[in-house]
Amino acid sequence: MRGLLPIALALSLSGCTQPSSGQPAPSPSPTPEEQKVTSPIVFDSARAFSDLKKQVDFGPRVPNTPGHSACRDWLLSELKAATGGKASRQDFSLTLDSKKLSMSNLVAQINPGAKKQVLLCAHWDTRPSADQEIDDAKRKKPIPGANDGASGVAVLLELARQLSKNPPKNTGVQFVLFDGEDYGPSIQRMFLGAAHYARHPALPKPDYAILIDMIGDKELQIPREPNSERMAPEVLDKIFGAAKSLGVTQFVSQPGPEIMDDHLSLQAVGWKAVDLIDFDYGPWHTLDDTPEQCSPESLKAVGDVLARVVHNEK
C-alpha cells in the first residue's frame, strides 16, 4: 500500500503524501568493509534498457490481456535462463466486480542454501487506465509502464544474470516479480500480488526485502522513504552507504514522500522491507510513461548499488 490507513483515500488519487518534515538524514559513512570491496559485477545497462523496451513492446501488461500473458512467459524464461532453472510461477486469482483476474508472481533464487537471505522485488504489471491524463478519452487507455513497472523488472533481470555468475559468498538472493500492483484505481484493488505473496510466500522468509519501483527516470533521485525508515532504517543505511561508497549520486540520503507500495504488504506480516522509488516523475500514470523518459544510466545506478549491498552481507 502507498501510505497509512488514515490517509488511504487521499493516496488512492495521489499515490503519496507530502514529504516528511524534519532535517535531512546524515549520509552514512562507508564501513571499512565497503571501502575494501570493489564493484562485484559488471551491470550491462544496455541489455537492461533493452529488457525495459521489450516489456513495453508487449503492450499493456494488465491481467487477462494478451500482453500480460506474453510478457509473463518471457519474463519467466529469462529468469530461468539467468538462474539455471531456479524460477517458477506463483499463480493466483481474484474476483473483482464479478470479473475473475488471473495473475502470476514470478519467483527465482540464487544460493538457496545460504543462511542469510535477501529479497529483491518489483512489480511487472501495468496500470489499466491512464488516470493522471487531463483528457477524458486518454484516461481510459492503459499506460505503457516503461518506468512504472518495466524499469524495476529490467534491473532485477540483469541482476539475476550477473549475480548468478558471481554470487555473494554468504547470502542467498531471492527475486520476486509481483503481479497486480497497479490494477486500481482504488487502494483496495492494488498491491494484489505482494499481498498474496506475503500470505503465501514461495520461498523462506528473507532477512529483509528491497522493493524497487519507478527507478528508470532520466533525472533519477531516490530519497529515504518514510515507511521504510520506520520499519528498517538499518536496511536503508546499508543501501545509502553502498551508494555513497560507489559514488552513485542518484541516491539522496534525505526524507522523501511517504509512499503506499508493495513493501507495506510485506511489512504487514512482520518482514523488514524498504522501498526505493523516485515518485517525482511527471509522466506517472499517463500515456507518456515511455522508454524515452528513462535511461540506462539510472538502471545501472540502482543495479550497482543493490549488487554491492548483497555482496557486502556477512
Image (cartoon, grey):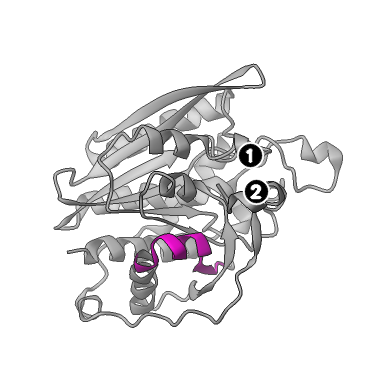
Q: Which residue is mark 1?
A: 127
Give whichever of 282, 17 is nearer the camera: 17
Point 74% across, 35% down: residue: 141
Q: Is residue 57 visible?
A: yes
Residue 97 x %, y %:
67, 21
Left or right placement of residue 165 versus residue 187 in this view: left
Give whichever of 63, 198 is nearer the camera: 198
Q: What's the mark number on residue 8? A: 2
Q: Helix, strand, or loop for circle 1?
A: loop
- Looking at the picture, does residue 222 appear above or below residue 46? below
- Looking at the picture, does residue 266 appear above or below residue 104? below
Residue 110 x %, y %:
22, 46
Q: What's the mark number on residue 273? A: none
Sort mark 1 into few (<14), some (14-19) or many (20+) by Cα contacts within 10 Å.
many
Residue 161 x %, y %:
29, 48
As shown in the figure, which amino acid type bears the numbered disc 1?
A: Arg
Asked if labels 2 and 1 touch by Cβ distance under 8 angstroms, the answer is: no
Q: CA distance from mark 1 to mark 2?
A: 18 Å
Residue 206 x %, y %:
28, 48
Q: Is residue 47 visible?
A: no
| Magenta stretch, residue numbers | 220-234
Sort mark 2 into few (<14), some (14-19) or many (20+) by Cα contacts within 10 Å.
many
Q: Earlier in the sequence, mark 1 or mark 2?
A: 2
* Mark 1 vs mark 2: in front: 2
Specify whether residue 26 is painted magenta: no
